[in-house]
Image: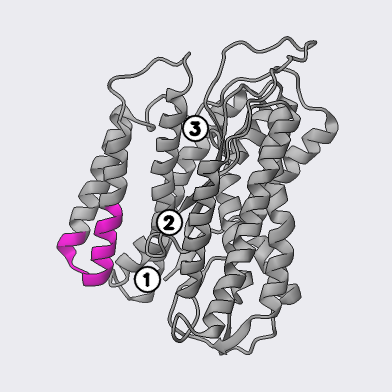
């Protein structure tokens, strides 16, 4: 996921192609350290996926397969951004991978970011940089998932563990490559297939057409400044989708006569969208601070407040799922109401520019690049998982 450190209000005239200075020498030591740490955390996560002792040979082999497949997808994604940025003479860093321990992330990493210190000069360059990462990652993720699901294990239905979300693309691949199942059977994904599934989930999130996510870059290249308005509406739609998802589960249970006994379970299945609503606001705040032409609003919600709200909602949801006490869910509801009230008064539920994309050249895309932009955004639809994890 590329992010910009600098921005400018000045866009080049349609007839001009701005000249960019030579990129600075590549710094790599910190990137290498983070990458090695990410290999370690991804491998440690892979060890927790298999049955039996963690140091058994099958677990070690599975962890190695998981690590190789996932990092192949993520490295391809990030290097797609990096080489395309360098091709357009945009000063881009090597990817900074983000290692996470197994208890924090189901994959052992939060992916990576690339810092771009110079302004992207044209909408064509913006499209190339934004689309190259997701398309490069999917170039490996799709065949890896096809191979992995073909080599997955058939198990009895109803085993323990999380049910992974599906999408239009995943359903098509399952139809073509997954083993045939009886009504009482399910598939335990091969480590390579799980890694590819994780790569597709990360790609789906990155393709959200909001702010400086990859999808935001592609959409701004396609639509220009109109995309800023679209991004705010899409961001709010993420919040709406949380309530729609949670409400649909609750209504289904009420109609079946179960009442609210599984409310905590349904919150856990839907909470990812509420978290991403707040995470996108945090990312927008960081991006806004790097744009000198934007005025600071002293009344706006700070990053620490949002992080505290996210942590509180997650902690209360986990406690509620474990102990199922009414008082815990009342507290969760109060924190949610306060969070939304703050966003309405001083955050992203009022008029704002936090998710506005840095301006770039005004020249529209040519027909070929328009087609690439549409295909890239369509991949978000094909990858969309309404419920990424169902516990």
Say whether disc 3 or disc 2 marks the residue closer to the N-terminus: 2
Would residue 365 appear left or right of 284 to someone viewing this image?
right
Residue wearing tag 1:
253
Q: Quadrant of residue 90?
A: top right
Q: Mark 2 or mark 1: which comes first in sequence?
A: 2
Residue 378 numbered tag: none
Which residues, given as a range, are shown in magenta?
313-328
The residue mark sitting in front, 2 or 1, is 2
Mark 3 falls on what kind of element?
A: helix
Q: Which one is in front, 180 or 120?
A: 120
Residue 317: within the magenta? yes
Q: Nearer the viewer, mark 3 or mark 2?
A: 2
On the image, numbered disc 2 is attached to which residue?
100
Q: Is residue 188 visible?
A: yes
Question: Height in image: 172 above or below 376?
Answer: below
- Main SS, magenta region, reads helix
Kindly state the secondary structure of the residue where label 2 is placed.
Answer: loop
Q: Which residue is mark 3?
A: 232
- The answer to which of marks 3 and 1 sits earlier in the sequence is 3
Question: Which residue is at a point 58% across and 69% down the rendered structure image?
Answer: 66
Q: Residue furthest left?
A: 327
Is residue 353 visible from the viewing direction of this image?
Answer: no
Per the model, the C-alpha gap separating discs 3 and 2 is: 30 Å
- For mark 1, give the secondary structure: helix
Q: Position of residue 122 (x, y in %)?
A: 71, 22
The x and y percentages for residue 164 are: 52, 69
Q: Quadrant of residue 296?
A: top left
Query: Spatial distance from mark 2 to mark 1, Cα to Cα?
Result: 35 Å
Circle 3 Cα neighbour tier, 10 Å, few/some/many (<14 / 14–19 / ≥20): many
């Amino acid at each position: 996921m590329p992010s910009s450190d600098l921005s400018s209000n000045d866009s080049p005239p349609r007839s001009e192609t701005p000249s960019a200075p030579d990129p600075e020498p590549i710094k790599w030591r910190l990137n290498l350290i983070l990458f090695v740490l990410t290999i370690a955390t991804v491998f440690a996560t892979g060890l927790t996926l298999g049955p039996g002792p963690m140091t058994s040979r099958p677990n070690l082999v599975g962890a190695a397969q998981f690590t190789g497949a996932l990092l192949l997808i993520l490295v391809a994604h990030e290097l797609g951004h990096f080489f395309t940025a360098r091709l357009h003479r945009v000063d881009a860093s090597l990817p900074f991978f983000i290692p996470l321990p197994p208890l924090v992330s189901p994959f052992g990493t939060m992916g990576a970011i690339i810092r771009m210190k110079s302004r992207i000069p044209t909408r064509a360059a913006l499209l190339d940089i934004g689309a190259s990462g997701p398309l490069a990652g999917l170039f490996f993720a799709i065949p890896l998932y096809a191979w992995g699901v073909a080599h997955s294990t058939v198990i009895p239905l109803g085993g323990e563990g999380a049910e992974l979300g599906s999408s239009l693309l995943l359903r098509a691949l399952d139809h073509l490559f997954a083993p045939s199942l009886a009504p009482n059977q399910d598939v335990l994904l091969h480590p390579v297939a799980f890694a590819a599934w994780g790569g597709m989930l990360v790609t789906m999130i990155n393709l959200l057409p909001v702010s400086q996510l990859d999808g935001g870059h592609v959409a701004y290249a396609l639509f220009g400044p109109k995309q800023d308005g679209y991004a705010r509406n899409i961001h709010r739609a993420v919040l709406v989708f949380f309530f729609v998802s949670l409400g649909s589960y609750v209504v289904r249970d009420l109609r079946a006569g179960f009442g609210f006994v599984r409310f905590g379970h349904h919150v856990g299945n839907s909470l990812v969208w509420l978290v991403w609503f707040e995470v996108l606001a945090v990312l927008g705040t960081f991006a806004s601070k790097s744009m000198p032409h934007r005025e600071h609003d002293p009344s706006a919600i700070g990053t620490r407040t949002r992080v505290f709200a996210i942590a509180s909602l997650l902690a209360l949801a986990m406690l509620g799922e474990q102990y199922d006490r009414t008082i815990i869910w009342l507290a969760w509801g109060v924190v949610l109401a306060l969070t939304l009230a703050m966003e309405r008064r001083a955050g992203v539920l009022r008029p704002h520019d936090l998710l506005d994309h840095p301006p770039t050249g005004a020249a529209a895309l040519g027909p070929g690049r328009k087609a690439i932009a549409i295909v890239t955004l369509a991949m978000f639809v094909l990858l969309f998982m309404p419920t990424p994890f169902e516990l």
